């Protein structure tokens, strides 16, 4: 069975967070037109994806939970009418506390959404305020409990670490508070200061970040806490209870086919990597226009093999020599053993029965290791 993941971008938020450089607008006044445009674009891929079975769907943003829930049902119904969707498809919706209520949650459930990914970032209200998040810890907690009550048994919570002036104790309090709620999955990302965001434009912010050694300890200590609490690490920033890994995101790391719909969405489909421009007006005007494609690259077998290593090394299972040979007809050891050897000696990478992977220490410096072995 040829499988396919679908990503749908909802580019609206209640307001912008101080660190965010995702394409999202704190202004939802074109929502209806945008949803219509999305439906048109989705339908236009019917023929191209005819031989595929969709086994994951992911609503990301932005804040998909800030628009009316009927739009989500409508989009899912369009996806089902356009593509063959597996009855056990994983269907995720990103949501923020302060934008959910029981009516929305029940409409999502009826529409088939079976996984929620809730953006928390911190359990400390002062930190949430500093990040310009729209909610408090208490609002998150009641949203989480409500989602459980409405039957969601697969919930991710996002935590962010290495925040300005964050201490290891503060972070540990957030980690413990989240684990006390027992979500099924935890995403744990370090704050990155992006240009052209309020944080990026304020030189004081960078000065207040925890130093490298503290960041290292924050990552290692939290990862250990997650594991002790029954969350298995399966990717640099992702931890899951048994059977609750995010199947959609694994497609990205395994370089499998996915189609992204909507403004700024990216796709990897049949060896072609392409993404749409960050321009909602142009998207609404003509969602089928070839001019919306901002970048496109037909990947050669060698490019795909490189992507497979670059993304696969993010996973704790690493890259597999049999899979590498099956997909690209190449010998993993011949291509990478010499390059990885210095990192294996420093215990930043290791040889596994099936191939290679990074150690947890190596994961923290994955960009450096990968840029070296892939010769960017
Ligand atoms: S809610 Fe998410 S997408 Fe929206 S501004 Fe904040 S971080 Fe960005």
Image (spheres, helix red, strand yellow):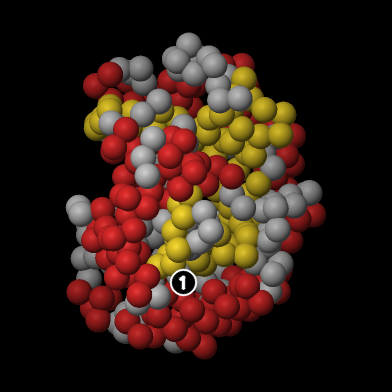
Q: Is residue 361 above or below residue 58?
A: below
The percent position of residue 187, horizontal first and vertical second, equals 53, 61
Compared to 307, does 205 lie above or below? below
Label 1, on which residue? 360
Residue 10 at least partly seen: no
| Residue at screen point 26% across, 76% down | 206
Q: Position of residue 299 (x, y in %)?
A: 29, 32
For residue 208, which quarter of the picture? bottom left
Of the pair 364 and 328, the residue shown nearer to us: 328
- SS at badge 1: helix
Does residue 126 appear to the left or right of 196 in the view shown? right
Q: Report the number of discs.
A: 1
Q: Determine the image quadrant of residue 248.
A: top right
Badge 1 crowding class, 10 Å Cα cut-off, few under 14, some 14 to 19, many 20 or more, is: some
Q: Is residue 6 left or right of residue 105?
A: left
Q: Position of residue 88 (x, y in %)?
A: 71, 34
Q: Quadrant of the N terminus?
A: top right
At x 32%, y 82%, the residue is: 212
Can residue 148 be spotted in the picture?
Answer: yes
**Residue depicted at x 68% and y 61%:** 241
Look at 74% across and 61% down and name the residue there.
Answer: 145
Residue toward you, 4 or 75: 4
Asked if ligand 1 lies within 8 A of label 1, the reply is: no
User: How far across and how far down the image is residue 126, in percent?
Assistant: 47, 78
């Amino acid at each position: 069975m040829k499988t396919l993941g679908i990503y749908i971008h909802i580019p609206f938020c209640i307001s912008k967070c101080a660190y965010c450089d995702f394409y999202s607008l704190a202004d939802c006044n074109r929502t209806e037109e945008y949803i219509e445009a999305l439906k048109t674009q989705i339908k236009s891929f019917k023929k191209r994806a005819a031989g595929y079975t969709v086994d994951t769907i992911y609503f990301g943003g932005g804040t998909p939970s800030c628009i009316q829930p009927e739009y989500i049902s409508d989009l899912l119904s369009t996806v089902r009418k356009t593509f063959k969707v597996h009855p056990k498809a994983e269907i995720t919706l990103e949501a923020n506390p302060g934008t959910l209520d029981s009516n929305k949650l029940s409409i999502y459930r009826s529409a088939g959404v079976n996984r929620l990914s809730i953006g928390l970032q911190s359990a400390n209200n002062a930190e949430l305020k500093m990040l310009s998040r729209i909610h408090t810890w208490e609002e998150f907690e009641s949203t989480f409990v409500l989602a459980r009550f409405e039957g969601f048994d697969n919930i991710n919570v996002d935590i962010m670490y290495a925040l300005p002036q964050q201490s290891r104790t503060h972070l540990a309090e957030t980690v413990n508070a989240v684990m006390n709620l027992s979500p099924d999955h935890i995403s744990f990302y370090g704050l990155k200061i992006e240009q052209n965001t309020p944080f990026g434009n304020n030189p004081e912010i960078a000065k207040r970040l925890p130093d490298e050694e503290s960041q290292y300890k924050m990552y290692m200590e939290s990862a250990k806490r997650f594991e002790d609490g029954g969350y298995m690490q399966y990717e640099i920033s992702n931890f899951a209870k048994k059977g609750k890994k995010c199947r959609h995101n694994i497609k990205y790391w395994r370089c499998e086919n996915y189609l992204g719909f909507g403004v700024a969405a990216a796709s990897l489909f049949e060896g072609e990597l392409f993404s749409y421009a960050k321009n909602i007006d142009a998207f609404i005007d003509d969602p089928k226009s070839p001019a919306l494609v901002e970048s496109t690259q037909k990947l050669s077998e060698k490019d795909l093999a490189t992507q497979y290593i670059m993304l696969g090394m993010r996973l704790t299972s690493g890259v597999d020599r049999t899979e590498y040979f099956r997909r690209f007809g190449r010998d993993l050891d011949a291509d990478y053993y010499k390059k990885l050897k210095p990192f294996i000696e420093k215990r930043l990478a290791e040889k596994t029965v099936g191939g290679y992977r990074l150690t947890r220490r190596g994961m923290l410096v994955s960009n450096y290791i990968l840029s070296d072995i892939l010769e960017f």
